[in-house]
Image: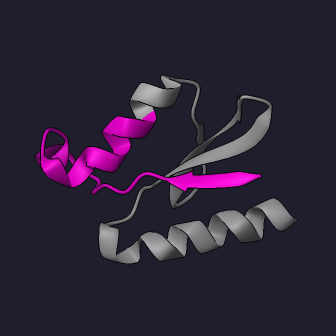
Amino acid sequence: MHLIVGLGNPGEEYRETRHNLGFWVLDMLYGGGWKEAELYRYAEWMLEGVPVVLIEPLTYMNRSGLACLLYTSDAAD
């Protein structure tokens, strides 16, 4: 499995800024049907037969590692 994390900042003030480039890329790749968790949203996807998880942390960029850590912890359960 591969993990692709799209970085961005939450909030309307960042929606149309360069700070959300990672969110834009994942939204173009996947489109819709995201699942919500406490600090991130994610999608499970198959890319040329390889399982891929896309994550968009719902934290500011400097806290995105926490969201990724929580995903890996949740996925292990």
Q: Residue at x 39, y 75 (%)?
A: 63
- Of all residues shown, which one is farthest toward the right? 77
Range of residues picked out in magenta: 1-26
Q: Position of residue 11 (x, y in %)?
A: 23, 50
- 1 sits to left or right of 65: right
Taking depth in this image into account, of 71 and 26 the one nearest to the observer is 26
Q: Position of residue 39 (x, y in %)?
A: 51, 61
Is residue 33 in the magenta section? Answer: no
Query: What residue sits 57% from the left and 67% below the top?
Result: 68
User: Does 4 appear in magenta?
Assistant: yes
Residue drawn at x 31%, y 55% as measured from the top left: 8
Left or right of 8 on screen, residue 45:
right
For residue 75, side relative to residue 29 (left or right): right
Looking at the image, residue 36 lies above or below residue 46: below
Of residue 2 and residue 7, the one placed in the foreground of this image is 2
- Closer-to-camera residue (57/53): 53
Which quadrant: the C terminus?
bottom right
In the depicted view, which residue is nearer to us: 14 or 6? 6
* Depicted 21 relative to depicted 62: above or below: above
The furthest residue to the front: 48
Q: How is the image coloured?
A: one colour
Percent position of residue 56, x then y: 47, 50
Rendered residue at 52%/23% (across/down): 32
Q: Position of residue 13 (x, y in %)?
A: 11, 48
